[in-house]
Amino acid sequence: VMCIILVVWQRRADWKLRDESKKMGGGQLAEKEKEELLKEWKEYGRKPLGGPSSTSIGESTTNVGTDVGSGIIVDKIEGVRLFIHPESKPYSARMTNGGNIESKRFPSSVLNFATLDYLGNSSSPLIHQTALNALSKYGCGSCGPRGFYGTIDAHLEIEDTMSSFLQTEGAVLYSDGASAVTSTVAAFAKRGDLLIVDEGVNEALLTGVSLSRANVRYFRHNDVKDLRRLLEKVRANDIALKRKPTDQRRFLVVEGLYRNWGTLAPLKEIVALKEEFHYRLILDDSQAMGTLGENGRGTLEHFGLSPMVHAEIVTFSLENAFGSIGGMTVGNEEVVDHQRLSGAGYCFSASSPPFLCKVGVASVRRIQGKLNHANHTNNAAAHETEEELSGQLLLKRLTQNTTKIYATLTDSSHPHALKLRNRLVITSHPLSPLIYLRLSDEEATSRTRGEQTLIMDKIAGRCFLEAGVAIVSTGGHVKKYLQLVPEPCLRITANVSQEEDDIEALVRALGDAVQSVFK
């Protein structure tokens, strides 16, 4: 009886709320209200959660970098250029050391050295046509989690394609790149287990480590000697406590190519230690997948290693080289099937839109050199992309552009690269398409982090406004939720669309900006 009364009471409340909603117009916004809200969002963006920023070098810099929004709205990407939406708010930054504020409107387009679209898939006409064809067939959403009416053939196709490409027994698809990494760690490590983690890993991995509730030990970034010291210490504790290593699950957690550092993990040495001390390896290869290795299979292939054999669990995002949205984890059948029941992002999130799965499949085929015009009904798009790079030529082009950027930035005979000497130094690996520059020791020693961030912001701002070159200043946003916070840097990203003239324009813009800021 009580249950019936409660149900009737709840239904009565629902009816009352529905009637009130109808009286107020059904709760729908008028078209004019929608236009005003959209205009306000485009003009002002999202407000920072913190207080006002202090921005003058030499004064208190406690809050510098709180407001990291640039006001940029990217309208589209075509080849090497970013096209800026005309309603982007004017750029306001301190353009001189004296603190004078100069307000400038964004250029209509800039050279793209900022996004992580290494292979240019986001602006590939063939990839675009693949997405359009899939939208026509499937629509946009998939209407549920994978285990509850959310799985269709497009999801199964990308899982089969990726496991075949990476030569593993299976693959599992997540609808978000960060969730894939986070859910994978938390699916395998639980309370009482042990995670040995590189202190330089990214925010998504650290979130997974935290959610796992496992015991965590950190070793110094890319320091194999410190890793060995830590593993030997754990072994000594086992002996003292008369505990078997098999009494708890134990994992090493590293990135292949570190997103916030541009450094490569010494995977051969790490795998040797993993096997010596009987650990499993969780590898986040989001930045290297599709960019490193002879066939684009990431850092494992680069070092002559294999998934399942040398790294039991490999997870990565589809949002970089693959030009899609989502993430995947590959491994043996046990690794994959376990996540279908224990991966929170798989079980409780709506599945990936089918057209994004088709984009991922097309990107893999482009890396393999198998993407052709046969499956595209738009003849104009097919004709336009007859010479589009794919296969080994695509990967070779990215390597050439990465090498060219490094070589030009460090060329002692280059007039604009000379302006960087004793001011900026490259800290990333020479093979990394993520190129990081920080202040030299001489320039950084007497400055606070806030002052260094402001200098990097000025350099990036001048490159953008005065030379039409987009690079990223990281000091304002790459600092939260990290175990080890990197120094404020400039991040330059290589991609296959860049030409030699574009790289010259980058170095010229960077040299002029550095000279102007430090004068």
Image: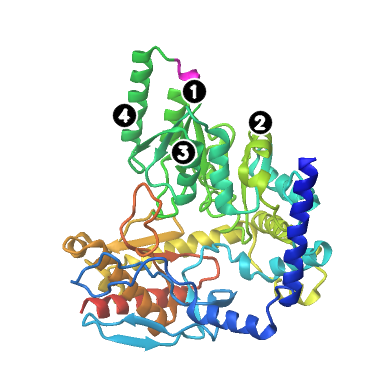
Name the amino acid, label 1.
Gln
Mark 1 → mark 2, Cα distance in angstroms:
18 Å
Res 312 visible: no
Looking at the image, which residue is at 47% across and 73% down? 500
Mark 4 → mark 3, Cα distance in angstroms:
16 Å
Crowding around mark 1 (Cα neighbors within 10 Å: few <14, some 14 to 19, many 20+) is: some
Left or right? Give the position of 250 relative to 490. Answer: right
Q: Are marks 2 and 3 in contact (CB under 8 Å)?
A: no
Please give the residue where the numbered disc 3 appears in the rendered image. 253
Please give the residue where the numbered disc 2 appears in the rendered image. 334
Q: Are marks 4 and 1 in contact (CB under 8 Å)?
A: no
Please give the residue where the numbered disc 1 appears in the rendered image. 248
* Nearest to N terminus: mark 2 or mark 4: 4
Mark 2 → mark 3, Cα distance in angstroms:
19 Å
- What mark, if any, has residue 229 been given in the picture? 4
Q: Helix or strand or loop: what does disc 1 sit on?
A: loop
Looking at the image, which residue is at 39% across and 12% down? 242
Q: Nearer the viewer, mark 4 or mark 1?
A: 1
Examine the rendered structure and indicate whether residue 69 appears above or below residue 487. below
**Image coords of residue 329 (percent x, y):** 61, 43
Examine the rendered structure and indicate whether residue 177 appears above or below residue 130. above
Task: Tell me, yes or no, whether the highlighted magenta stretch contains residue 36.
Answer: no
Left or right? Give the position of 87 relative to 101. Answer: right
Q: In the rendered image, which quarter is residue 358 located in?
A: bottom right
Crowding around mark 2 (Cα neighbors within 10 Å: few <14, some 14 to 19, many 20+) is: few
**Magenta highlight range:** 244-248
Mark 3 → mark 1, Cα distance in angstroms:
16 Å
Looking at the image, which residue is at 31% across and 29% down? 229
